[in-house]
Image (cartoon, rainbow, N blue to C red):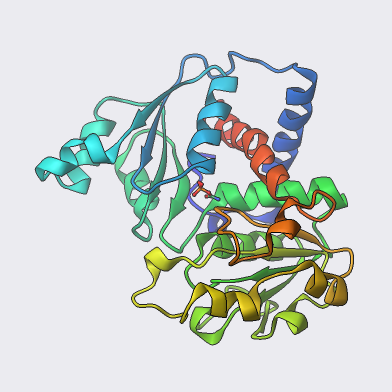
């Protein structure tokens, strides 16, 4: 792999190869046995133009577990504040010859733009509502770990489908890997088109989660809405908030997932998020490390 810009550019075999490598690193992390200096000669630039807890930190941990050194560039303290534009900033940083770039940006396709200008590999840590490929990969790893497979799983994604890059990448990955995908959202948060015709769209939570193996909730992406599309968080929660009662009535045995950040009292009830017998949320976070080690290895370690 030269870059990882989106799930849209991967086929099922390539996704399978990344998941196998992630599984290798997951076992290696448990046993303490892997090449700690695999990327020892590499310097990776983290260019996060949007805030992050999970993605930024787990990319840094993954890089350090493989011996790489990381430069956490900060847009707030950069010369962008003096009027330098995005392109000149990217050209300036690329002139320092990093071995790899991991980036997040609010603009659609920004990582593809940077990949076209840079001489080093670029990994997308999330752009606009388009793609968040490593999130979908770690979600897939989590499902595979729990259920032993992805093919044939019934996965329902609930929430702001229209503005979520996690939904964008997950819908593609899950369909490519043979899962049955449903999405649930109010009409204002449902995209005009879905990426695969097999994906079922629902406006009613109970209908959409019926018989699901996995229910994945998503945050309201208010920063990407032109105006307030939902009257209040409480109104959203009343109709689409996931509770143990609803889950047990319509999808008994389903596991819940959420890429985070979890906004308490909006996506799901607190006790469900914290119920280790029903929630895979912290497993998703933990699996971010071996998944990102796998991606760094495949992109930079060749
Ligand atoms: N899931 C995710 O991308 O979380 P962060 O915004 O904290 O990185």
Q: In the figure, residue 32 lies in which quadrant?
A: top right
- Quadrant location of the N terminus? top right
Left or right of 105, for residue 78 = left
- Residue 103 screen position, x and y as percent: 40, 42
Q: In the figure, residue 302 lies in which quadrant?
A: top right
Residue drawn at (84%, 77%), measured in percent from left and top? Answer: 250
Camera-nearest residue between 67 and 176: 67
- Residue 142 screen position, x and y as percent: 74, 47
- Residue 140 screen position, x and y as percent: 71, 51
- Residue 143 screen position, x and y as percent: 77, 52
Residue 148: in sight, yes or no?
yes
- 227, above or below 289, in the image: below
Total marks placed: 0
Residue drawn at (42%, 67%), measured in percent from left and top? Answer: 222
- 81, above or below 45, in the image: below
- Seen as rendered, the residue at the extreme left is 82
Residue drawn at (64%, 81%), measured in percent from left and top? Answer: 239
């Amino acid at each position: 792999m030269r870059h990882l810009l989106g799930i849209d550019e991967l086929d099922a075999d390539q996704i399978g190869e990344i998941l196998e490598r992630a599984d290798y690193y997951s076992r290696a992390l448990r046993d303490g046995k892997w090449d700690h200096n695999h990327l020892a000669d590499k310097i990776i630039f983290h260019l996060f133009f949007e805030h992050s807890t999970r993605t930024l930190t787990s990319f840094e941990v993954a890089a350090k577990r493989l011996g790489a050194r990381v430069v956490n560039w900060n847009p707030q303290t950069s010369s962008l504040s003096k009027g330098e534009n995005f392109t000149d900033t990217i050209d300036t940083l690329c002139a320092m010859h990093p071995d790899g770039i991991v980036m997040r940006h609010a603009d659609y396709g920004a990582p593809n733009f940077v990949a076209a200008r840079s001489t080093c590999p670029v990994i997308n840590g999330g752009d606009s509502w388009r793609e968040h490929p490593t999130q979908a990969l770690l979600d897939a790893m989590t499902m595979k770990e729990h259920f032993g497979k992805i093919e044939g799983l019934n996965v329902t994604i609930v929430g702001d489908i229209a503005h979520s890059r996690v939904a964008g990448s997950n819908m593609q990955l899950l369909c490519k890997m043979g899962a049955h995908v449903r999405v649930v959202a109010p009409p204002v948060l449902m995209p005009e088109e879905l990426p695969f015709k097999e994906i079922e769209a629902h406006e009613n939570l109970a209908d959409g989660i019926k018989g699901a193996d996995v229910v994945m909730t998503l945050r309201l992406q208010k920063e990407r809405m032109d105006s307030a599309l939902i009257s209040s968080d409480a109104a959203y929660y009343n109709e689409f908030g996931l509770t143990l009662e609803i889950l047990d009535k319509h999808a008994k045995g389903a596991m819940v997932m959420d890429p985070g950040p979890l906004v308490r009292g909006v996506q799901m009830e607190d006790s469900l998020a914290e119920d280790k017998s029903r929630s895979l949320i912290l497993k998703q976070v933990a699996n971010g490390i071996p998944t990102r080690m796998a991606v760094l290895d495949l992109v930079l370690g060749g």
